[in-house]
Image (cartoon, rainbow, N blue to C red):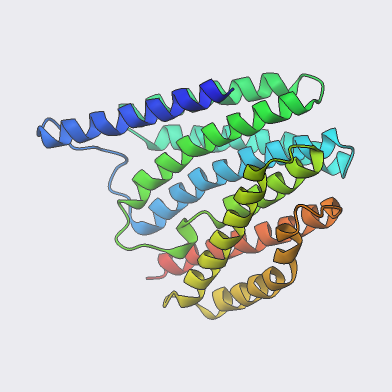
């Protein structure tokens, strides 16, 4: 499965180099979408970033269900995540006109189909590692799409930085370690992700456009985060998979609420 990830990275590199050459030669401008305003662009970015969250959620739920932890909820959530992912991809496909982006989305869909086939097989650590790699490849493609959209914003907004994606990563890494994937990279990625969320929360607090409701939600996020982040950093001690499942779900909802309030505040300007 490492080969599939390497193929996607090579594909993305070729995509970027081709775009750069075309623009430098004056043969065309890298058209992503039409002349959307910031509110419309933020909705599309939210859609792309949501797709990243959903695919990580699928992997996390596979690990939980496979280890008979929160099994019913995990299976239900996984089914819902796959359905929502397909719906999000349809929206993005309808929004984009750039053939390179559409080609990238086709490649993402190839990985999604492989993921769905793997999910039909019995649970195993080998399949878990396959799904982790597929999830990373798909997420990388979605990140590229979101980054192209962010370039068209008139200003940068903290809600466009993928907080929910990193929350989904936390639960995935924790359960991967609990499942037996006890390598240094899993621990390192958990620590890195926790630091990223710390940084994103600071950025959200510093944003001058926060409304009263946004600040209220942000205070709730910060309060919860201060309590639970040590659970994630203690990944090597383990033993708290249900707590991690529940707390990451709460964080996800609060970050989603903040993003929705952000889009609403942009619409009023």
The number of callouts visible is: 0
Residue 183 at what x, y percent from top left?
69, 40
- Look at the picture and state if 80 lies above or below 234: above
Residue 19 at what x, y percent from top left?
24, 33
Visible in this render: residue 217?
yes
- Look at the picture and state if 234 lies above or below 168: below
**Which residue of the protein is positioned furthest toward the front in this rendering?**
184
- Relative horizontal placement of residue 60, taking residue 200 as reference (left or right): right
Q: Which quarter of the image is occupied by the N terminus? A: top right
- The picture quadrant where one finds residue 134 is top right
Picture residue at 60% right of the left edge, 49% below the top: 189
Picture residue at 90% right of the left edge, 38% below the top: 68
Task: Between residue 133 and residue 75, name the one nearer to us.
Answer: 133
- The picture quadrant where one finds residue 93 is top left
**Which residue of the protein is positioned furthest toward the bottom in this rendering?**
212
Residue 115 at what x, y percent from top left?
64, 25
Q: Which quarter of the image is occupied by the C terminus? A: bottom left
Picture residue at 71% right of the left edge, 70% below the top: 224
Task: Between residue 118 and residue 76, name the one nearer to us.
Answer: 118
Residue 216 at what x, y percent from top left?
61, 78
Picture residue at 42% right of the left edge, 33% below the top: 94
Visible in this render: residue 261?
no
- Relative horizontal placement of residue 111, taking residue 234 as reference (left or right): left
- Relative horizontal placement of residue 93, taking residue 24 as reference (left or right): right
């Amino acid at each position: 499965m490492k080969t599939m990830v390497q193929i996607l990275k090579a594909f993305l590199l070729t995509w970027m180099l081709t775009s750069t050459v075309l623009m430098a030669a004056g043969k065309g401008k890298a058209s992503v979408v039409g002349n959307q305003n910031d509110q419309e662009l933020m909705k599309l970015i939210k859609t792309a970033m949501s797709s990243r969250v959903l695919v990580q959620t699928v992997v996390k739920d596979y690990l939980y269900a496979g280890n008979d932890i929160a099994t019913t909820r995990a299976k239900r959530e996984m089914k819902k995540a796959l359905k929502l992912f397909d719906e999000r991809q349809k929206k993005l496909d309808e929004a984009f006109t750039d053939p390179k982006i559409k080609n990238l989305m086709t490649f993402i869909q190839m990985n999604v189909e492989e993921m769905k086939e793997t999910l039909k097989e019995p649970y195993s650590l080998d399949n878990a590692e396959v799904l982790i790699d597929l999830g990373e490849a798909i997420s990388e493609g979605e990140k590229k799409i979101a980054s192209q959209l962010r370039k068209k914003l008139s200003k940068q907004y903290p809600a466009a930085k993928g907080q929910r994606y990193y929350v989904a990563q936390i639960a995935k890494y924790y359960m991967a370690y609990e499942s037996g994937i006890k390598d240094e990279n899993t621990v390192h990625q958990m620590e890195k992700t926790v630091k990223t969320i710390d940084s994103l929360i600071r950025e959200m607090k510093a944003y001058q456009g926060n409304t009263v409701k946004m600040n209220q939600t942000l205070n709730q996020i910060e309060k919860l985060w201060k309590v639970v982040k040590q659970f994630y950093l203690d990944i090597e001690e383990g033993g708290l998979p249900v707590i991690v499942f529940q707390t990451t779900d709460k964080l996800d909802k609060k970050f989603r609420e903040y993003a929705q309030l952000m889009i609403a505040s942009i619409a009023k300007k």
